[in-house]
Image (tube, rainbow, N blue to C red):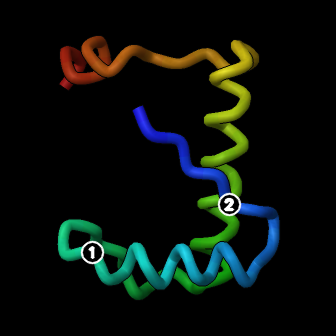
Amino acid sequence: MTTIHIDDTEDKAIAFLNYVRTLDFIEIEDGDSKKTILKNIKLGLKEVKLAKQGKLETTPAKDFLNEL
C-alpha cells in the first residue's frame, strides 16, 4: 500500500494534479474546473483519513466487485 501526503496548499495540489495528468492511464474530464478537482481531491484525502481512523464505514473491494 502507498500513502500520498499533500500539504494543504493549493500550489502543491495543483502540482500533483498536473503530474497526474501526465500519466497515460489517468483520465480527467475537461468539464471539471481545477477548483472542483482540487476540492474533490481534498475531500477524498479527508475520507481516506477518516476511514483509516475507523470513523468512516467502508466496503471491502471484494464485496464492492461482487455487487457489480
Q: Earlier in the sequence, mark 2 or mark 1?
A: 2
Residue at 69% in and 66% down: 39
Quarter of the figure that contains the C terminus: top left
Query: In the rendering, which numbered label is found on residue 5?
Result: none
Foreground pick, 68 / 43: 43
Quarter of the figure that contains the N terminus: top left
Residue at 44% in and 85% down: 31
Residue 63: image location, x then y, percent: 29, 12
Determine whether the residue tagged by mark 2 lies in a helix, strand or loop.
Answer: loop
Residue at 70% in and 33% down: 49
Q: Quadrant of residue 38?
A: bottom right
In this picture, residue 23 sits left or right of residue 52: left
Determine whether the residue tagged by mark 1 lies in a helix, strand or loop.
Answer: loop
Residue at 20% in and 67% down: 25
The residue identified by callout 1 is 23
The residue identified by callout 2 is 6
In this picture, residue 44 sits left or right of residue 11: left
* Residue 13 vertical position relative to residue 47 in the rendered view, above or below: below
* Residue 31 vertical position relative to residue 45 in the rendered view, above or below: below
Q: Amino acid at mark 1?
A: Leu
Residue 10: image location, x then y, percent: 76, 78
Q: Quadrant of residue 13?
A: bottom right
In this picture, residue 67 sits left or right of residue 35: left
The CA span between labels 2 and 1 is 18 Å
Q: Amino acid at mark 2?
A: Ile
